[in-house]
Image (spheres, rainbow, N blue to C red):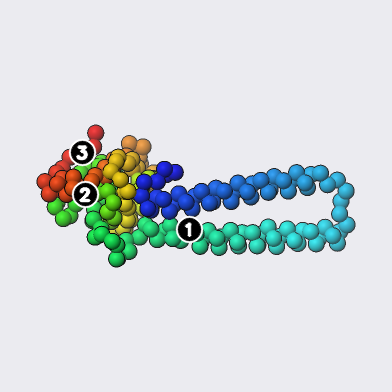
Amino acid sequence: MLDPAGPSAQAIAQVWWWMFGVAALVLVGVCLAGAWAMRRRAPLPPVQAQRVARRWLVGGGLLLPGVAITALLIFGSPAGLHQLPWPGAAQAPLRVEVTGHQWWWEVHYPDTGARLRGEMRIPAGRPVDVHTRSADVIHSFWVPRLGGKLDAVPGRTLVLRLQADAPGLYRGVCAEFCGTGHAQMPMQVQAMSAEAFEQWLRAGATGAAP
């Protein structure tokens, strides 16, 4: 997830690095403040102690969290918007239907009827709208290098937009504990060139990941 291979994953990684940097600064600040506080041996007069405590309460308990949450909302919201199937994409998105089972993924291409088991093939450089659902319990569809997580919920269909910048193999997983076989529920996502993908799709190929 720290080696993004698509615009959605890139946006998420950027937010994560900013959060990591700010959290590191806060940690250093807290450690320095703690060290400074332990060095003060003489107690403060009651009035001054109350004034200092009020400043820490307002600054550290209200202002700092308020600024942090506002900044996270401003910088994090665009990353979330990358995951949504907005209309007006430069290319028409490919529709792929993914159904979670205990414990494997069923992948269906409604335009041709092609089906895969534990494997998804997509064209590189083109947005893909993944329609997720579940046949039994709650699963969570996640391809870390291509985008964020989306739950596969029984009785509902949720849509996540992914895109791979270049051809390659990308590992997907179920990120929601779904039973005793949860750890054995990976998925292989193969991004192909547009020409190779169209040729494969027209052939109506079906298969299964190893």
x and y percent of residue 138 in the render? 34, 50
Q: Which residue is mark 3?
A: 208
x and y percent of residue 85 in the render? 32, 61
From the viewer's perspective, tell me whether residue 113 is left or right of residue 162: left
Tell me which label, 1 or 2, sits earlier in the chain.
1
Identity, as a three-letter code, of the amino acid under mark 1: Gly
From the viewer's perspective, tell me whether residue 49 is left or right of residue 1: right
Tell me which label, 3 or 2, sits earlier in the chain.
2
Q: Quadrant of the N terminus?
A: top left
Q: Residue most toward the left?
A: 203
Q: Which residue is mark 1?
A: 76
Q: Which residue is mark 2?
A: 194
Q: Quadrant of the C terminus?
A: top left
From the viewer's perspective, tell me whether residue 147 is left or right of residue 134: right
Identity, as a three-letter code, of the amino acid under mark 3: Ala
Tell me which label, 1 or 3, sits earlier in the chain.
1
Q: CA distance from mark 1 to mark 2?
A: 31 Å
Q: Nearer the viewer, mark 3 or mark 2?
A: 2
- Which type of secondary structure does the marked residue at label 3 adopt? strand
- Which type of secondary structure does the marked residue at label 1 adopt? helix
Residue drawn at the location 73% of the way across and 58% of the way down: 56
Q: Residue most toward the bottom?
A: 88
Q: Are marks 3 and 2 in contact (CB under 8 Å)?
A: no
Residue drawn at the location 30% of the way across and 65% of the way down: 87
